[in-house]
Amino acid sequence: MPMKPLFRASQVGKLMAYPDKDTLSDGALTYVYELASQMLLDWKPELNTFEIEKGRVVEDQTIALYNSVSGNFYVKNKERKYSDLFTGECDINEDDEDLILDIKSSYSKKTFPLILKEGDKKLYEWQLDDYMLLWDRGNAGLVFGLVDTPSHLIKKQDPEDWHIVGHIDESLRITTLFKKRDAKREEQLINKTRVAQDVLCEILDKRGFDFKKLEK
């Protein structure tokens, strides 16, 4: 049986409107259609490289900032997990605390969320649900951190002051969201993602996609 496309933990929130229903919303279908287009036509969405590159470069600094604020000694996870539906690589996997964490490094003062908006919370919570399922953990957390932006990653139109933050109280530069594992939400996540996977496979199959590519 050919391998089926997997959904990354960071993607699943886009599928989860009306989680009790066993059909996809218009927005979720649009997202699945875009994934099909990317796979069939071999393209990737344009990514905002300054924000993403900062996230890569300062990840260890953000973990260190959170360790300083929380009094922990967390270290970066390097393992990626797979199931028949999902794939994900959480940032911190802590056995002793039955906990996984996802670390996000905000680009600037302007983009750092002092308070998480309700819509954003929903997307992130589904991502955390997915990580708990993949790692079989009972607790998950999302950590937003704000550290200095390397000078070469500051956009020309941005005031430099938006990116120099090391002098600000550390506790003001951390925002967290924690949740516990929820069997009902997990079931909703699995059911909805399976529908999305079936729709995606049907589109790919009709267009002659070579599923062997997924085995690489």
Image (cartoon, rainbow, N blue to C red):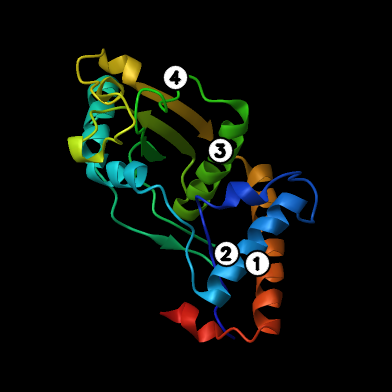
Q: Amino acid at mark 4?
A: Leu
The numbered mark, 1 or 4, whose residue comes first in the sequence reads: 4
Inter-mark Cα distance, 2 to 1: 8 Å
Q: Evaluate whether residue 95 shows in this view.
A: no
- Horizontal relation, residue 171 to residue 199: left or right: left
Q: Is residue 24 above or below residue 54?
A: below
Circle 4 or circle 3, nearest the eye: 4
Q: Are marks 2 and 1 in contact (CB under 8 Å)?
A: yes
Label 4 – label 3 distance at C-alpha = 17 Å
Cβ–Cβ below 8 Å for labels 4 and 3? no
Label 3 CA crowd tier, 10 Å (few <14, some 14–19, many 20+): many
Q: Identify the residue position indicated by label 1 in the image.
A: 197
Residue at figure coordinates x 25%, y 20% from the top left: 165
Residue drawn at the location 39% of the way across and 54% of the way down: 89
Figure quadrant of residue 105: top left
Q: Are marks 1 and 4 in contact (CB under 8 Å)?
A: no
Q: Where is mark 4, residue-wise?
A: 114
Q: Residue at x 26, y 45 (%)?
A: 76
Sequence order check: which comes first, mark 2 or mark 1? Answer: 2
